[in-house]
Amino acid sequence: MLPCFVTDPGNDARPVHAVALSAYATWLAAQEPRRRAWLEGGVFEAKPGAVALLPGADGAPDAALLITGDASDPFDAARLPPALPAGTWRLEPGGSLAPADAVLGWAMAAYRFERYKEIPARGVSLAAGNGAAIDRAHALARSIWLARDLINTPANDLGPAELEDAALGVAERFDASFSCITGDDLLAQNYPAIHAVGKGSSRAPRLIDLTWGDASAPKLTLVGKGVCFDTGGLDIKPSSNMLLMKKDMGGAAVMLALAQAIMTRNWPVRLRLLLPAVENAISGNAFRPSDIIATRKGLSVEIGNTDAEGRLILADALAEADREKPDVLIDAATLTGAARVALGPDLPALFSPSDELADAIATAGDDAHDPLWRLPLHPGYRAMLDCDVADLSNTGTGGFAGAITAALFLKAFVTDTPSWAHLDIYGWNPSARPGRPKGGEATALRALFTALERRFTA
């Protein structure tokens, strides 16, 4: 259990009353005169997200009020930890906030990244309760914390080898099979694009491979971009654009965290996780603009820009995933600035040739308060990737539709798996909001978990 929760509230846990705005007047009328006078005579304004401390007989707060919308939302609960005084709190039964949403929102708000700097604990905890829905919320919360920790860790302490160690730790906890192809062995085993991107670094590139579950169960394969730092390569980024490039392994962090949540919940699936992990560095051995590289699929790629490296390592991993023809294949990557220009940091761009899968993920995202936005795999833009001297260019021509052409590039490596989705994510909160602290974020994890849960466990 995460440290922001207690299993036994004891007799000192104070109640939190979660009341929908539409029911607030009725709730207020039923309160004792002292409490009603406190709320009516002060500065409290009843609106979704508002928190008020309610005084006891001695004037000290002995309860709290949270105003919510009509639908339960974990981000309402996320407003509680910073607003409540130290001590243990419990959710009053029968309120407008589902206990599982309270647990999840509380955990998302309580997260702190303390690897390098201790943040004094406020001593606020929630009596979490128990039950299947609560256990599910705990699994999601632990996975969100894992993804955030990985993304927040700088590249000097999280390179390809350290990402491998993190994945191995998860594999060992769930008795999953684990292997890793490293360095020149990538060439020997036909992963030339991963090798090409990572060979310029002193930290060897690798392909991390985890499998778990009954081999006869439906196959679910997850792929995550693991560029542990991206200088842009020889097409070097401006310094300002390099500041957040520790997060360029955000797709790998989210997919590893999602795999952990799936194994925690013991889904009836054959899970495979593929994480190509590299550092895109600058050296005499780095790949160059105009190089032509091979791929596992057998397609040749001319390098138009060494800063379009994420799609290259994903190409090899997706080709391997596609070889098995899984029932569902999903990849996530911090892939293009174009997606962020179009949709901003909160909305991942969702691409899929399957209307059924795209609709399922989008609906689940709305239901989980973790929305996505579908963009088209417009076939008319495929010509932007044409190349005179190779099968593909890794950059589109004309400067338009960068997120779409990147997705179309990946689609060339997924030819046998109809139920495939690609998520172009940001993996970062540029500013702090309730439940979303500034820094690394497990973008789309709750949406994907909900969609896949409905498909494989319903």
Image: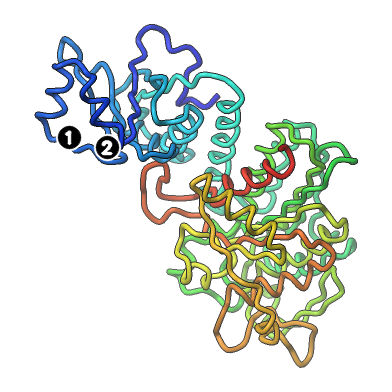
Would residue 157 be visible to someone looking at this image?
A: no
N-terminal of the pair, mark 1 or mark 2, is 1
Residue 389 is situated, as x and y percent measured from the top left of the image, at 79, 90
Residue 28 is situated, as x and y percent measured from the top left of the image, at 22, 25
* In-image side of 344 versus 85 (left or right): right
Vertical relation: 277 (above or below) 455? below
Q: Which amino acid does label 1 sit on?
A: Phe
Please identify the residue farthest to the left as the structure is shown: 41
Vertical relation: 190 (above or below) 224? below
Vertical relation: 287 (above or below) 388? above
Which residue is depicted at the point 37% across and 42% down?
A: 434
The quarter of the picture where the N terminus appears is top right
Q: Which amino acid does label 2 sit on?
A: Ala
Quarter of the image where one finds residue 117: top left
Determine whether the residue tagged by mark 2 lies in a helix, strand or loop.
Answer: loop
Structural crowding at the residue carrying mark 2, measured as other residues with C-alpha within 10 Å and reported as few (<14), some (14–19) or many (≥20): some
* Residue under numbered circle 1: 44
* Residue under numbered circle 2: 50
Quarter of the image where one finds residue 102: top left
Which residue is depicted at the point 62% across and 43% down?
A: 450
Residue 433 is situated, as x and y percent measured from the top left of the image, at 36, 47
* In-image side of 199 versus 337 (left or right): right
Would residue 323 be visible to someone looking at this image?
A: yes
Q: Residue 443 carries which label?
A: none
Vertical relation: 236 (above or below) 441? below
